Amino acid sequence: MYPAVIEDYQRPASIDEALKAAARYDAGEALFLAGGQSLMQAMKSRLVRPRCVIDLQAVKDLKGVSASGAGVRIGAMTRYVEIAKEAKLKGAYGALGDAAAHVGDRQVRNRGTIGGSLCWNYLAACMPAANLGVGSSMELISASGKKRTLVADEFIKGPLDTARTDDEVLVATTLPAAPSKAGSAYKKWGLVTDALPVIGVAVYVELDGGGAISKARFAVGGLATGPKRAKGAEAALIGKKASDAAAIAAAAEKASAELETQSDLWADSAYRKNLIRSLGGEMIALASKRAAGQ
Ligand SMILES: Cc1cc2nc3c(=O)[nH]c(=O)nc-3n(C[C@H](O)[C@H](O)[C@H](O)COP(=O)(O)OP(=O)(O)OC[C@H]3O[C@@H](n4cnc5c(N)ncnc54)[C@H](O)[C@@H]3O)c2cc1C
């Protein structure tokens, strides 16, 4: 399949140039191109028919991972391959490295970006669930120069939907400075290892001085309604020791019960619930281990 005719291709060198290019078109007529791993397929199948493609690959300000006292900032155009080996994300934000390391195959990881995955927000995608799990925020800027920051819970909506407006560029994902005893983990399960998963689970925990869980986030991807948090499971983990296998299993069970799962060609609803239960327990244990510095 070939895309429909594209009238205009722009390759800006700055965010400002990218926004100016977008402002020349009506909403939805100009699309930003990141790694192209979803957009090119969507253009070829004519799911989208942009008049203009604005290629962000030469915009240096959108690339790279930096750390400061405020936390970690990941440029929207940072590729999976870079995130997978990024030392600044180990421990507290290890879930992002876990997700990036297992997205698709080597080619996809060398082209695809965190920003592209978040903006596309495919229902089974790893990055939306992992970002919801660790509680990151999205920095956006619009053609009018208006900047805003949305937490993942606000930014990520239903499948293929986010709070981003057509004239906004996602600039970066930010992660607050984590306490010393924080850890996160993500794992996906799919019918094919180098493709989108059936279910992916991300867990973030903080431990108090006595080794009990003081904060927890539990997010699941692969649901028909888009990535969701299991807030009952999160509440069930508070005050529990990471070594308490029964408490971990009970929290994973709660997540499996509280989230609505669908039956489709890849798995039935009960199987998805089993995956949430088994991956959930495994990820709570791994995130807790990382939080304890093990
Ligand atoms: C074979 C294959 C296997 C895959 N397996 C997996 C998998 O296991 N797990 C998984 O999570 N995903 C998987 N994917 C999807 C992959 O992760 C895509 O890379 C991702 O969905 C899109 O990222 P991208 O950088 O390629 O963005 P693009 O495809 O270039 O863009 C996607 C969308 O985001 C918009 N956009 C991109 N960047 C910005 C920005 N900075 N600001 C505003 N809008 C922006 C674009 O306009 C477009 O609408 C797979 C894809 C393929 C082809």
Image (spheres, rainbow, N blue to C red):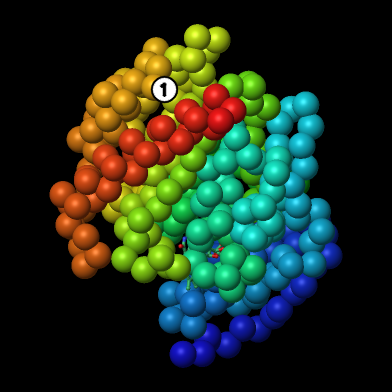
Q: How far across and down, in percent of the image, does residue 293 sit?
A: 59, 28
Q: Which image quadrant for residue 46?
A: bottom left
Q: How many marks?
A: 1
User: Could you tell me if residue 206 is visible in this image?
Assistant: yes
Q: How far across and down, in percent of the image, does residue 79 sit?
A: 66, 60
Give the camera-side residue of 97 and 27.
Answer: 97
Q: How far across and down, in percent of the image, does residue 146 sit?
A: 71, 42
Residue at horizontal 16 percent and vertical 49 percent from the top: 270
User: Residue pushed farthest bottom?
Assistant: 1
User: Could you tell me if residue 144 is visible in this image?
Assistant: no
Residue at horizontal 71 percent and vertical 31 percent from the top: 71
Instruction: Using a 10 Å C-alpha cutoff, classify the residue at mark 1 as few (fewer than 14 neighbours), some (14 to 19) or many (20 or more).
Output: many
Residue at horizontal 75 percent and vertical 62 percent from the top: 18
User: Residue pushed farthest top?
Assistant: 210
SS of the residue under disc 1: loop
Q: Which image quadrant for residue 198?
A: bottom left
Q: Is residue 135 left or right of residue 238?
A: right
Give the camera-side residue of 225 and 96.
Answer: 96
Give the position of the C terminus as an image quadrant. top right
Q: Quadrant of ligand 1?
A: bottom right
- Residue at mark 1: 242
Q: Is residue 49 left or right of residue 61?
A: left
Q: Is residue 136 above or below residue 49?
A: above
Q: Is residue 24 above or below residue 290?
A: below
What kind of residue is marked 1? Ala
Q: How far across and down, in percent of the image, does residue 48 sit?
A: 48, 73
